[in-house]
Amino acid sequence: MDNIYQEALIAEAKQPQNSDLLTTADLKYHGTNASCGDEVMISLKFSADGKTVERVGWEGHGCVVSQASMSVLSEKLIGARLTEIKKWQKANLLPFFGMNEISSGREKCFMMGLEAIQKALS
Amino acid sequence: MFDPQQVKKHFPILDQEAHPGKPLVYLDSAATSQKPKSVIEAMNHYYLTDNANVHRGVHVLSDRASELWETSKGKVAQFIGAQKDELIFTRNTTEAINGIAYGWGEHNLQKGDVIVSTIMEHHANLVVWQELCKRTGAKLLVVGLQDEAEINLAEFEKAVRQPNVKLVAFVHVSNTLGTVNPVKELVSLVRKHAKGARIVLDAAQSVPHMPVDFHQLDVDFLVFGGHKMLGPMGIGGLVVRLNLLKSSEMQPWLFGGGMIQAVQAQTATYSDDLSERFTAGTPDVASALGLAEACKFLDNLGMENVMKHDFELVKYAFMQLSRIKGLKIIGPKPKNYNRLGSVAFIHDSVHAHDLAQIIDSEGVAVRSGHHCTMPLHQACGWQATTRASFNVYSTKTDIDALVKAFDRVNQIFGL
């Protein structure tokens, strides 16, 4: 079904938030979706105590699902504790798009950003 | 007269709605084809009336199952112009290629030897050789493309002129570009410059769409998968030239029951009977039977007719899709059967996954991604492509539905 293609999601993908890499970052990570070649580069700046994310910058290429999901995630990351971020799941992101579930065929697109962040933090 | 609307009636799965009010239009046959009723019924009939393990049984069902296994193998071999003993059933094309690596490659390659392949290969015809190189110390040379559409023949010739080329592997019909490779020309270049080198032809996407004759093609190994040619999943074939199969160059690579001559506690000898020597373990009789039935179905249509029908669809799809704003079709422009099976494209502002999903919402099934040809996508700078692919039941009306689905794409993306 195409009900994921709501205006909000397309608008988010067209004008993504935080979509510039940070010039000075504490952590950089390159994530890919092997099933389609989509990719994302994420840069993070941590708080002085290293426990929370202070700033986020990213760049990516991919479908609107992966780009919109990464955009929303980037806003959610700011001020979040690293220990919390490691526990996030797709259920933490779906409500932003008014969704309860995503088809198995698109889950990898939707989760590319979060999986990249979690791998970077692990 | 070949009438795809009549052919379609043999495929019950196609008579359904994909979404409420949206009839299913199946344009993903390069990934797997649908199966005619006769194939499904033959397999059901086997399990309902004839099932037993093959060979060495003396009872009536075992006799019947053995007979069906052997006649099915004969039918499939005949369909691709091979002798029955030259065909080894595998699970799929990928397993067949692995069979060449383990059954031939491990015994004939060493450090300093060269394997030549091309950038348009399916991962199965590259990764297997990468791994074989790791095990033997051989080197893999990958030939590039010309005009993002065809094998660069000058580069191919240069590659096969290298010293110690022992194996050359290439695809007959590309699953992404649709390109039909000039097998005759490629084979003659190999035979001329790399004496004694063995040739592997990946025929997974050619056998379903055109007449294929193993002996005429003059290759040493030919591989194909049953599920892309109207047969069931779980069966494919490795065809090996008889004199090679009989020689010590080719060794069994799967061991156990069914392939032995005699077994002692510490050693074993293997069967000289070629139908046993390379088929270890209980074979998939029902799938062999289903595949043989698929060959009969295709024989009845006539592969020349199938090829003409397919090329008509390719030309029609190419022409209709070319008219869509922002769409670039990849692969060669259709001319004289130079491409078959599929038409893949890239939209200048909509990602392949988004395209495929919106097209699906209109009931049309297409595939998006890299189609197991990542190196090709990288070489051409394509992140992902969307592919519409055909088989005997595909019609121009199906392609019209695909074209119509772009209205929805344009609506959603405000194009």
Image (cartoon, rainbow, N blue to C red):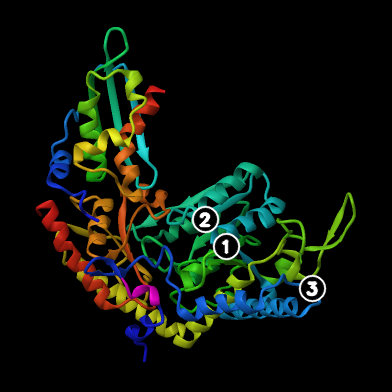
Where is A64 relative to A19, above or below? Answer: below
Mark closer to the observer (2, 3): 3
Nearer-the-camera pick, A35 or B339:
A35
Nearer-the-camera pick, B233 or B352:
B233
| Chain of the residue that carries numbered disc 3 in the rendered image | B
Mark 1 vs 3, N-terminal side: 3
Pointer 2 residue: B125
Mark 1 vs 2, N-terminal side: 2
For the residues beneath circles 1 and 3, the answer to whether they share a chain is yes
Nearer-the-camera pick, B38 or B314:
B38
**Residue A21 in view of the camera:** no
In three-dimensional space, the C-alpha distance between marks 1 and 3, rounded to whole angstroms, equals 36 Å
Q: Amino acid at mark 1?
A: Val
Element class at badge 3: loop
Do residues under tags 1 and 2 come within 8 Å of each other at their CB atoms?
A: yes
* Side of B186 where A120 appears, left or right: left
- Which secondary structure dominates the residues rendered in magenta? helix
| Chain of the residue that carries numbered disc 2 in the rendered image | B
Mark number for residue B57?
3
Q: Quadrant of residue B101?
A: bottom right
Q: Quadrant of the C terminus of chain B?
A: bottom left
Pointer 1 residue: B200
* Side of B97 where B403 appears, left or right: left
Nearer-the-camera pick, B326 or B355:
B355
- Residue sticking out furthest to the bottom: B1
Q: What is the magenta range? A: B12-16
Q: Quadrant of the N terminus of chain B?
A: bottom left
Q: Amino acid at mark 3?
A: Gly
Q: Amino acid at mark 2?
A: Asn
Q: Position of residue B142 (x, y in %)?
A: 48, 51
